[in-house]
Image (cartoon, rainbow, N blue to C red):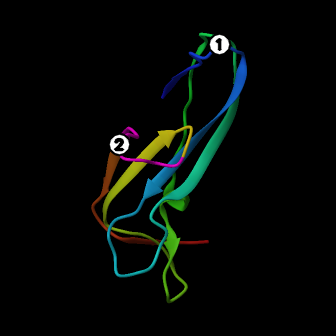
Amino acid sequence: MVVLNNGPYDSYNVIQLYIKTPVTSMKSPIYQLKGFENEFFKVNEKKEITFMLDEQALSFITDQGKRVVLKGEYIIYIDENQPTKKTKKAFLTIDKEKEISY
């Protein structure tokens, strides 16, 4: 993601990555913070911010205590705030549920 400081001052920006897991009967937060970068920007400076998502970041613990990556569509949000309806998003589809180690 390319981030631009279009404000009148040099400043730090905290870029946050959230995911929304596929719909499931298991309880999980609507949005899960999975990463953030705190970057300093000069006025009108652009920087490319990169996040890496691995299986651990996509997984959560079931009621049976197993760590799994669920089958389905994940929604990925990157912004300076929690996701809203205006936040840009990307989609990631997992074809098969997978149990992973801790």
Residue 74, disc: none
Image: 77 above or below 27: above
Q: Secondary structure at mark 2?
A: strand
Stretch in magenta: 82-89
Q: Nearer the viewer, residue 29 or 64?
A: 29
Q: Nearer the viewer, residue 40 or 92?
A: 40
Q: What is the quadrant of the C terminus in the image?
A: bottom right
Residue occupied by mark 1: 8
Identity of the amino acid at label 2?
A: Ala
Residue occupied by mark 2: 90
Q: Is residue 21 left or right of residue 93?
A: right
| Category of crowding for the residue at label 1, using alpha-carbon neighbours closer than 10 angstroms: few (below 14), some (14–19), many (at least 20) | few
Identity of the amino acid at label 1?
A: Pro
* Pair 1/2: label in front: 1
Q: Residue furthest bottom?
A: 64
| Category of crowding for the residue at label 2, using alpha-carbon neighbours closer than 10 angstroms: few (below 14), some (14–19), many (at least 20) | few
Q: Is residue 74 left or right of residue 39?
A: left
Image: 72 above or below 1: below
Q: Residue at x 47, y 73 (%)?
A: 28
Q: Residue at x 72, y 16 (%)?
A: 10
Main SS, magenta region, reads loop
Q: Nearer the viewer, residue 77 or 74?
A: 77
Q: Earlier in the sequence, mark 1 or mark 2?
A: 1
Q: Residue at x 49, y 87 (%)?
A: 63
Residue 56 in the image: state x and y as whole percent. Answer: 55, 61
Q: Is residue 12 magenta?
A: no
Q: Is residue 71 left or right of residue 64?
A: left
Q: Secondary structure at mark 1?
A: loop
Image: 42 above or below 37: above
Q: Residue at x 48, y 59 (%)?
A: 31
Q: CA distance from mark 1 to mark 2?
A: 30 Å
Q: Nearer the viewer, residue 48 or 15?
A: 15
